[in-house]
Amino acid sequence: MVGGFNHNFRYKEQIFHVQTEDSGVKKSEITTLLYSGGTILARQTTSYAELSPNASLAEQVELRMKDQHKQMLRQLKSGHYDTYIDEALGDGSQPEKQPKHVEPCKSAQAANKAMGIDELIFAYLTAGR
């Protein structure tokens, strides 16, 4: 199993992450993922099952991993994934939605008051009633 590659890449004022991993000889796949903030935007998986297991297998897999990793970086830079990015993240033209305001629970309100530990525990335990 060959170690993976990770790169952060700035494109259109956003940071994207490209990650390439080897699944190991049992599965014999190389997977490259394009992320933005934890959201997977694109995936490319390539099998290397046809390679014969010999002394140079790790070198061959590493070379394929580098090529696949670079290919996704080039495709990102060329705009190949723009449609996926716009669909998943929006085009930025819509105003950001404000997070919904949530009232703090009773135990949190009680914690804000000067209480001893016993009162705080009691407030926490009875908050759901």
Image (cartoon, helix red, strand yellow):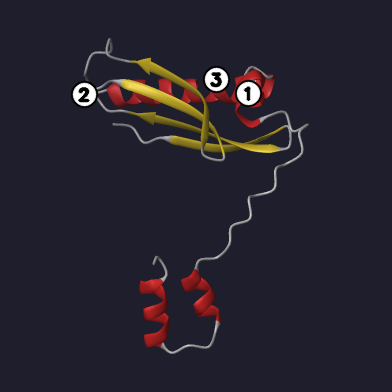
Tell me the quadrant of the picture where the C terminus can be found.
bottom left
- Kind of residue at badge 2: Lys
Choose the circle earlier in sequence order: 1 or 3: 3
Q: Are marks 1 and 3 in contact (CB under 8 Å)?
A: no
Name the mark on residue 26.
2
Which residue is farthest front?
Answer: 129
Give 93 or 126, whichever is nearer the viewer. Answer: 126
Choose the circle earlier in sequence order: 1 or 2: 2
Above/below status of 34 relative to 113: above
According to the image, label 3 marks what residue? 71
According to the image, label 1 marks what residue? 87
Q: Tell us which disc is closer to us: 1 or 2.
A: 1
- Dividing the picture into quarters, in which one does residue 56 lie? top left
Number of numbered callouts drawn: 3
- Dividing the picture into quarters, in which one does residue 53 lie? top left
- Kind of residue at badge 3: Gln
Name the mark on residue 64.
none
Q: Tell us which disc is closer to us: 1 or 3.
A: 1
Does dot 2 land on a helix, a strand or a loop? loop
Query: What residue is drawn where x is 49% and y is 70%?
Result: 106
Mark 1 surroundings: few (<14), some (14-19) or many (≥20) residues within 10 A:
few
Q: Are marks 3 and 2 in contact (CB under 8 Å)?
A: no
Mark 3 surroundings: few (<14), some (14-19) or many (≥20) residues within 10 A:
few
- Kind of residue at badge 1: Glu
Does dot 1 land on a helix, a strand or a loop? helix
